[in-house]
């Protein structure tokens, strides 16, 4: 009986945090008047600081460390509640789907940079490869669209593998420069390639499962119609859950240990038998695979893909999300993605200044919280495990 | 053949500097060999060449009947040689357990399927490794057992050294190379660490150790035999007392009177 009660006691702060965040997000997404939004954002920041000052965040952290599986389940439930609250609102649902799919992409980057230490400044390019794959396959082939994101992921990993040789031969900043070069090359290639639509880009047909078109609204009863984005919301949420579990299990295994070891000291790692190339390749391909899947699905959601959608600047945003959230912490990646995607969309007044806002946020985080909003905790192989 | 490790005519240069100059060095099974010599005499280079960090320019290294000349660090580790580093090379943000279990790489299952899907099997392997790491830590410093899942970043130098040695020992190597384990520690701490090493040795009498050290008290206390290097060459060999009395050795350390 005793351990059961201890479990339940530590579940409460986490549940409280999830409920508070969900309620806050629903309020933020519902209001449209700029002064109220600014007020809400200010209240959110002040509330977070107050909670930290009152020591309320520590039990939340412990609660997530102890019962992550259960809280993960509740977080999925919370996302569903959030989507249900906006069941007929195209704009909000699109925003939520964007957060989910960008989160998958940042989880991919997390494997590469957070664990293996391979900086990838071409994240948006691999996202774009997924989207272009969806554009081509959905229009010109009879491949079931449900398989298309998978193929997009595989193709992103495959094309990314052309970078393996230079990435393995160089270290740190130099490897990062290689990925920047790739991003520029890919964009130029897409712009001059007429088969892929050139600079105008291509249309992407939507997802279809067994004749169910994802791009039609869902009519449940006579006066109850759900936005068609609800389809994409469900698929994106499933994808994010899958990616999250994958990244979590990866970290909490010998593979995660190997990636950390080689990131921190390649020489020492070699002296204990680690095959550096094998693990860098594993991380790089796996990361691009996730990014590619998310990109393919995102292409279908948006219905359109062009070289300009996936530029070096977008890759930088993905990397800044990683830094903002806390490198190596998947919860941090998801939270930071929500912040970076939602705030500029809601703060229409600052639209033109969004890059300035990113810059300020990233500088502030690096200055005052260098390990990110949610710093990565020490590895626990099996949460709740006791010797 | 009684030599566990046999280096013959081993040479390694860095630009114009000859770090190892046709060095012949044999490590006998089950001994503790002290490797001494002035700064820059090639002791660490010898370790780095044996463990595959540097390739030798010429010469050969045979370990336990296997030619490991110019082999990769991974191959050398698999053959049964583990080491510590002169400047502590732990992964500071990782826990004590993580740092130690990295050393057991060759006994862990690294398949993606095993690690991601067969979590129950992984858990069994994790628990076995936890017990092994715990036993090692307990032998060195029982107080660290309760902190085994805390980052090593907050630990003092002596504990970091201990963890480095645990990391080298967990895979049960045949040969342990200790590169100046007393660097950066006080006299008392050094004495404590040497007690630990002797204790480990008492538990496993088949473990062969080569230790590079500047503190002659340590060398005198724990080694069976010494080899003295100067300018990458062996200038003396024998029990510590005999070597310390050697005129060539005194000249190398103190200069010509």
Image: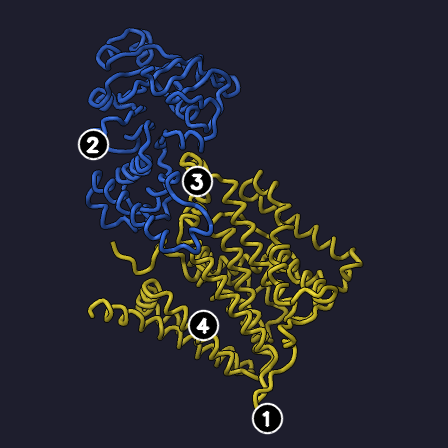
Is B120 drawn above or below residue A239 in the view shown? above
- For the C terminus of chain B, the quadrant is top left
Image position, residue A343 (x, y; %): 54, 72
Q: For mark 4, does the 10 Å Cα neighbourhood hold few (<14), some (14 to 19), or many (20 or more) residues?
A: some
Precedes in sequence: disc 3 or disc 4: 4
Chain containing the residue with disc 3: A
Q: Is residue B97 left or right of residue B10?
A: left
Label 1 – label 4 distance at C-alpha: 28 Å
| Residue pictured at 38% horizontal, 69% vertical | A71
Query: Judging from the image, what secondary structure is the residue with disc 4 in?
Result: helix
In the structure shown, which secondary structural element does the residue marked by tag 3 occupy?
Answer: loop
**Marks 2, 4 in one chain:** no
Read off the residue under disc 1.
A222
Q: Does the rendering let one see residue A370? A: no
Question: What crowding class fits label 2: few (fewer than 14 Cα within 10 Å), some (14-19), or many (20 or more)?
Answer: few
> Separation of disc 2 and disc 1 at Cα?
80 Å
Q: Nearer the viewer, mark 3 or mark 2?
A: 2
Label of residue A265 in the image: 3
Instruction: Provide the secondary structure element on which disc 2 rests.
Output: helix
Q: Nearer the viewer, mark 1 or mark 4?
A: 1
Q: Nearer the viewer, mark 3 or mark 4?
A: 4
What label sits on residue A308 in the rendered view? none
Earlier-in-chain disc, 1 versus 4? 4
| Residue with the mark numbered 2 | B203
Say the numbered circle drawn on residue A76: 4
């Amino acid at each position: 009986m005793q351990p059961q009660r201890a479990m339940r006691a530590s579940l409460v702060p986490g549940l409280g945090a999830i409920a508070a965040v969900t309620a806050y997000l629903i309020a933020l997404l519902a209001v449209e008047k700029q002064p109220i939004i600014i007020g809400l954002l200010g209240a959110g920041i002040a509330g977070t600081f107050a909670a930290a000052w009152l020591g309320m965040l520590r039990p939340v952290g412990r609660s997530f460390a102890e019962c992550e599986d259960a809280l993960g389940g509740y977080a999925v439930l919370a996302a569903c509640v959030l989507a249900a609250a906006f069941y007929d609102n195209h704009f909000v649902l699109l925003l939520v789907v964007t957060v989910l799919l960008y989160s998958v992409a940042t989880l991919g980057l997390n494997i590469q940079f957070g664990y293996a230490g391979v900086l990838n400044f071409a994240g948006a390019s691999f996202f774009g490869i997924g989207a272009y794959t969806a554009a081509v396959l959905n229009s010109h082939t009879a491949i079931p669209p449900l398989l298309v994101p998978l193929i997009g992921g595989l193709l992103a990993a495959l094309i990314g593998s052309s970078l393996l040789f230079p990435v393995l031969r160089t270290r740190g900043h130099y490897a990062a420069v290689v990925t920047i070069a790739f991003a520029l090359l890919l964009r130029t290639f897409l712009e001059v390639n007429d088969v892929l639509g050139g600079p105008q880009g291509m249309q992407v047909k939507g997802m279809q499962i067994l004749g169910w078109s994802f791009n039609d609204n869902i009519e449940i009863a006579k006066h109850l119609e759900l936005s068609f984005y609800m389809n994409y919301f469900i698929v994106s949420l499933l994808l994010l859950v899958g990616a999250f579990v994958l990244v979590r299990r990866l970290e909490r295994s010998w593979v995660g240990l190997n990636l950390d070891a080689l990131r921190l000291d390649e020489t020492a790692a070699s002296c204990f038998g680690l095959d550096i190339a094998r693990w860098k390749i594993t991380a790089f391909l796996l990361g691009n695979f996730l990014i590619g899947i998310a990109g393919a699905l995102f292409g279908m959601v948006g219905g359109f893909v062009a070289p300009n959608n996936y530029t070096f600047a977008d890759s930088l945003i993905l990397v800044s999300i990683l830094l903002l959230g806390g490198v190596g912490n998947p919860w941090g990646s998801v939270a930071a993605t929500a912040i970076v995607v939602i705030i500029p969309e809601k703060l229409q007044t600052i639209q033109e200044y969004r890059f300035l806002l990113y810059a300020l946020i990233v500088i502030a985080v690096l200055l005052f919280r260098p390990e990110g909003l949610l710093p990565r905790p020490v590895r626990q192989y099996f949460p709740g495990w006791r010797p | 053949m009684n030599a566990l490790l046999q280096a013959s005519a081993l040479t390694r240069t860095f630009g114009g500097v000859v770090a190892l100059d046709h060095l012949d060095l044999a490590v006998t099974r089950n001994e503790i060999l002290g490797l001494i010599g002035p700064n820059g005499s090639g002791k660490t280079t010898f370790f780095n060449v044996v463990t595959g960090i540097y390739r030798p320019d010429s010469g050969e290294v045979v370990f336990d009947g296997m030619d490991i000349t110019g082999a990769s660090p991974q191959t050398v580790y698999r053959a049964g040689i583990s080491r510590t580093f002169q400047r502590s090379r732990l992964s500071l943000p990782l826990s004590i357990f993580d740092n130690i279990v990295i050393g057991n790489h060759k006994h862990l299952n690294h398949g993606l399927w095993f690690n991601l899907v067969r979590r129950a099997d992984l858990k069994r392997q994790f628990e076995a490794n936890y017990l092994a790491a715990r036993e090692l830590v307990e032998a060195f410093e029982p107080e660290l057992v309760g902190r085994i899942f805390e980052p090593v970043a907050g630990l003092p130098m002596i504990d970091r050294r201990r963890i480095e040695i645990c990391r080298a020992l967990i895979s049960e190597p045949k040969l342990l190379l200790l590169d100046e384990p007393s660097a950066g520690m006080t006299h008392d701490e050094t004495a404590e660490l040497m007690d630990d090493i002797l204790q480990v040795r008492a538990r496993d009498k088949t473990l062969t150790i080569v230790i590079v050290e500047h503190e002659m008290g340590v060398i005198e206390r724990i080694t069976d035999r010494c080899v003295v290097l100067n300018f990458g060459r062996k200038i003396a060999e024998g029990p510590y007392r005999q070597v310390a009395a050697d005129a060539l050795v005194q000249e190398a350390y103190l200069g010509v009177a």
